[in-house]
Amino acid sequence: CKIDYAAPADLLRDRVILVTGAGDGIGRAAALAFAAHGATVILLGRTIDKLERVYDEIEATGGPQPAIFPLNFEGATLKDYHDMTETLDKEFGRLDGILHNAGMLGRITPFEQYNPELWSQVMQVNINGPIWMTQALLPLLKASDDASLIFTSSSVGRRGRAYWGAYAVSKFATEGFMEVLAEELEHLGTIRVNTLNPGATRTKMRATAYPGEDADTLRTPEEIMPTYLWLMGPDSRGHNGERFDAQPPR
Ligand code: NDP
């Protein structure tokens, strides 16, 4: 956890960073924080007007001009990921980081009642989609001399919890995939792959999962950005295949 990390203003200068789920919650805060530290951010998500609002905010605060990439992990195909790679290749020629942040909760419900279609949907959005997108984008990551791949995990991706169903399983898969890819890419020395657990954070997803909770007791997405900046930027070089937390346990 690097919650006390003080990121230099130019930490991500000249870096091209893709953020998934950039229109809301933690992804929105990360896109704004990365841009504020000099990054050219590619805003990926499924709700275009939310992405446009983040785009406008970055422009208004004088950050490098971002890009918008509309994509819904639910229906996206391999062709979409390859088209995306082609577009980003033409525009930028490389990628210096991906924050895999988009995610859905599914339902908090006893496994006995878990709907198999919803289960597949959660696996698609939280892990399968991001995996195939990463495969397609690997050539662009290899074109960078210092790339950071961050997969968003959760405490239930490190220890299972009753009723968390597909969400927990997708986060365990995220941890496992991170370890596989980190070891495979280790020899390159230029791409690090790690997981980051944001911890309880004041967003719509958290409010849905814990409807009775007082949201004011939670850290905001903005407050957990130091760890995100540290892990995306060059100060975390050399860390590969590791699990991080964005805030101390409550
Ligand atoms: P939010 O629900 O606020 O944001 C989720 C983001 O993912 C939204 O931008 C959403 O887009 C996007 N998204 C959802 N489904 C899809 C899809 N099918 N295709 C593309 N984008 C999609 O959640 P958080 O900000 O809280 O969560 C961010 C990440 O952090 C998730 O991976 C979550 O699992 C993880 N996390 C969060 C915790 C918390 O306490 N908040 C704790 C532990 C982990 P749209 O706005 O258009 O719906």
Image (cartoon, rainbow, N blue to C red):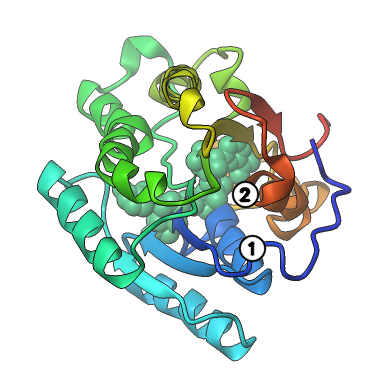
Vertical order, 90 against 162 (above or below): below
For the point 49% across and 67% down, which residue is it? 41
For the point 81% across and 29% down, which residue is it? 249
Quadrant holding the N terminus = top right
Q: Is residue 77 visible?
A: yes
Q: Residue 8, percent across and down?
A: 80, 64
Q: Secondary structure at mark 2?
A: helix
- Which disc number belongs to residue 12? 1
- Which disc number belongs to residue 232? 2
Quarter-of-image position of residue 52: bottom left
Compare residues 206 and 87 and report the one nearer the observer: 87
Q: Amino acid at mark 1?
A: Leu
Q: Residue 186, percent across and down?
A: 50, 24
Q: Amino acid at mark 2?
A: Met
For the point 28% across and 38% down, which residue is it? 129
Quadrant holding the C terminus = top right
Mark positioned earlier in the residue sequence (2 or 1): 1
Residue 247 in the figure: left or right of residue 149? right
For the point 17% across and 50% down, which residue is it? 82
Vertical order, 119 against 229 (above or below): above
Compare residues 20 and 95 and report the one nearer the observer: 95
